[in-house]
Image: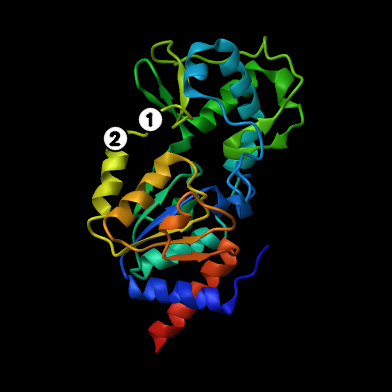
């Protein structure tokens, strides 16, 4: 854990004070303190094998069986994760009028659980399902019960935590794993999240772009921005002349666009920031 320096927090506090309407963009680094692993190291490189591709999930039943078997084991820890200091600090910043919109690349719902209300879940939510045939939605908690009922031999396996509700489960034969179909039409069920190789719904992107018309600056927290879906907003903000700052340990794809970069633990830095802003407000 890298403690924030007084100089970096001074700069971050000044940035937030000088730009009263913030567009905040968060990534996996903000949820690691809640026990949800991230994908990349401080250089922005993969720490593990890349996640499943959308095309493979749709085309190959074997890929789906492997995905859902690992998800069966990874879901309980993911679903039980609680907001950490960073999530609570950002909720406080919204309530005090500093955050106009929060766009998150995470699929864990922890910003809303902490009390943030102006949130766009750019990549969707893992606690929801969608049928790719009839588009009917579903609940991941109920689906977990169905997975466990159909696959009792898998429920006792031990697996390590992986990002986004996945689990490290190798050397296992997934051939017999039984994946439920959509109860409404018999179609193919998928988590209602954006997989790699799948496009972000246009309405979410348009809403985020529209928000850039109403804010003073963009603050990136806990994201290397290596994925274009998030990087595009930093690039667009810079093109519009909006200052861009990042609170992130390690390299980001937008380093050459940044007006300020603070390399520190998100929770420690944001807690200190909110305390200073509160002290200022009290006079």
The residue where tag 2 is placed is: 202
Q: Residues within 10 Å of mark 2 (few under 14, many from 20)?
A: few
Q: Which mark is residue 172?
A: none
Residue 34 rendering spot, x and y as whole percentages: 61, 52
Residue at position x 59%, y 36% from top? 165
Q: Nearer the viewer, residue 64 or 178?
A: 64
- On the picture, is 4 further left or further right than 210? right
Q: Secondary structure at mark 2?
A: helix
Q: Is residue 272 above or below residue 148?
A: below
The quadrant in which residue 69 appears is: top right
**Figure colour scheme:** rainbow
- On the picture, is 235 further left or further right than 169? left
Residue at position x 64%, y 41% from top? 77
The residue where tag 1 is placed is: 199
Residue 46 rendering spot, x and y as whole percentages: 62, 39
Q: Nearer the viewer, residue 117 or 63?
A: 63
**Marks 2 and 1 close (CB-CB < 8 Å):** yes
Residue 283 rendering spot, x and y as whole percentages: 39, 89
């Amino acid at each position: 854990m890298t403690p924030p320096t007084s100089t970096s927090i001074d700069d971050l506090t000044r940035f937030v004070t000088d730009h009263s309407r913030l567009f905040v963009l968060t990534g996996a680094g903000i949820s690691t303190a809640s026990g949800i692993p991230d994908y990349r190291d401080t250089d922005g490189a993969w720490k593990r094998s890349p996640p499943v591709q959308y095309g493979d999930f749709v085309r190959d039943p074997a890929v789906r069986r492997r995905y859902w078997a690992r998800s069966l084991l990874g879901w309980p820890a993911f679903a039980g994760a609680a907001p950490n200091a960073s999530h609570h600090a950002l909720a406080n910043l919204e309530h005090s009028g500093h955050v106009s919109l929060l766009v998150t690349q995470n699929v864990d719902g922890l910003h809303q659980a902490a009390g943030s209300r102006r949130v766009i879940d750019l990549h969707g939510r893992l606690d929801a399902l969608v049928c790719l045939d009839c588009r009917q939605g579903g609940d991941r908690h109920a689906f977990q019960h169905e997975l466990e009922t159909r696959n009792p031999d898998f429920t006792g396996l031990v697996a390590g935590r992986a990002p986004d509700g996945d689990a490290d489960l190798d050397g296992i034969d997934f051939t017999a794993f039984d994946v439920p179909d959509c109860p409404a039409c018999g179609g193919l069920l998928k988590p209602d999240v954006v997989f790699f190789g799948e496009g972000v719904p246009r309405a979410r992107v348009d809403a985020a772009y529209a928000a850039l018309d109403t804010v003073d600056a963009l603050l990136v927290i806990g994201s290397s921005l290596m994925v274009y879906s998030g990087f595009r907003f930093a690039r667009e903000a810079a093109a519009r002349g909006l200052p861009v700052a990042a609170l992130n340990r390690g390299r980001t794809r937008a380093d050459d666009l940044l007006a300020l970069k603070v390399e520190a633990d998100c929770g420690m830095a944001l807690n200190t920031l909110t305390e200073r802003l509160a002290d200022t407000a009290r006079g």
